[in-house]
Image: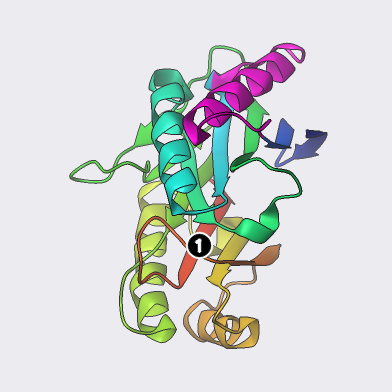
Amino acid sequence: MRKRLFSWLGKEFVELIGEAKPAATATEEAQALFQRFERELRGHGLSLDNTVRTRLWGKDRESRDLGSTERVKILSGKARSASSSFISPTHFDSGARVAIDLLAMRPSRPDLQKVLKEYDPPITPLRYLVYDSVVVLSGVTAVLPALEEQMADILPRIEGSLKDAGSSWNQAVQVSFLLHRSQNFETLKALFEKQVKASIRQTEYFHVDGYSSAGKLIEIEVTAGV
């Protein structure tokens, strides 16, 4: 497991990145990994309730699905947070089937609570959360024939969520693009720059092999201020 403590947006964050220890099932791997994360967070006076984002990796579709199902059970109630999930065999250096990146935040006052916004009707991912002036969106995807069509569908929905949260593209501090391995980063960048004119402080790009369902070519995560 890798742990990173850093200051960002005037807050203290703890990032935990780990592969599960191989177990009989992906469900057991996810359970054990979250238990390890909980222990690490408690060492810093935090808990899973302070989670703002998780990114789950599965070695194959079954592992992604089982891991994601277990994550929903564990990160419920006050621990509910923005999320995304991917299939990527090359992400793994061990025999594990599940890996998780978790980001937790220490609010400026201990009494501050996350404001959770669901989709209407609710679906498995949270639409977004606002926590002490930080806005965190779950990964946004679409199932349409081509990348250009998916981007044209996704970006206005992200803009709508940012607006509803009291933010905007101009206040976005990080945008993460998780692109299907069959697609080209330069094409993606051109499509994004054509539709979003804001100057984003930080962007990052990853290739993945699959998503929650077939037909998706891109998933976009956004973090912003208010």
Query: On the picture, is 14 further left or further right than 119?
Result: right
Which amino acid does the dot numbered 1 rest on?
A: Ile
Percent coordinates x, y for residue 36 in the rendering: 68, 20
Q: Main secondary structure of the magenta part?
A: helix
Please report the residue visible at 51 percent of the width from the left and 35 percent of the height from the top. Answer: 26
Extreme residue in the front direction: 24
Please report the residue visible at 71 percent of the width from the left and 62 percent of the height from the top. Answer: 202
Query: On the picture, is 2 further left or further right than 59?
Result: right
Please report the residue visible at 76 percent of the width from the left and 49 percent of the height from the top. Answer: 93
Residue 49 forms part of the magenta stretch: no
Q: Is residue 137 visible?
A: no
Compared to residue 117, the image places residue 191 above or below, namely: below
Question: 210 or 142: nearer the eye?
Answer: 210
Percent coordinates x, y for residue 114 in the rendering: 47, 27
Question: 226 or 46: nearer the eye?
Answer: 46
Percent coordinates x, y for residue 2 in the rendering: 81, 36
Span colored in magenta: 20-48
Q: Is residue 16 visible?
A: yes
Residue 29 forms part of the magenta stretch: yes
Q: Secondary structure at mark 1?
A: strand
Residue to which mark 1 is pinned: 220
In which quadrant of the rendered view does residue 205 lie?
bottom right
Compared to residue 209, the image places residue 46 above or below, namely: above
Question: 93 or 16: nearer the eye?
Answer: 93
Please report the residue visible at 69 percent of the width from the left and 42 percent of the height from the top. Answer: 95
Q: How many marks?
A: 1
Query: On the picture, is 34 further left or further right than 153?
Result: right
Classed neighbour count for the residue bearing mark 1: other residues with Cα under 10 Å, few (<14), some (14–19), many (≥20): many
Q: Quadrant of the N terminus?
A: top right
Query: On the picture, is 116 further left or further right than 53?
Result: left
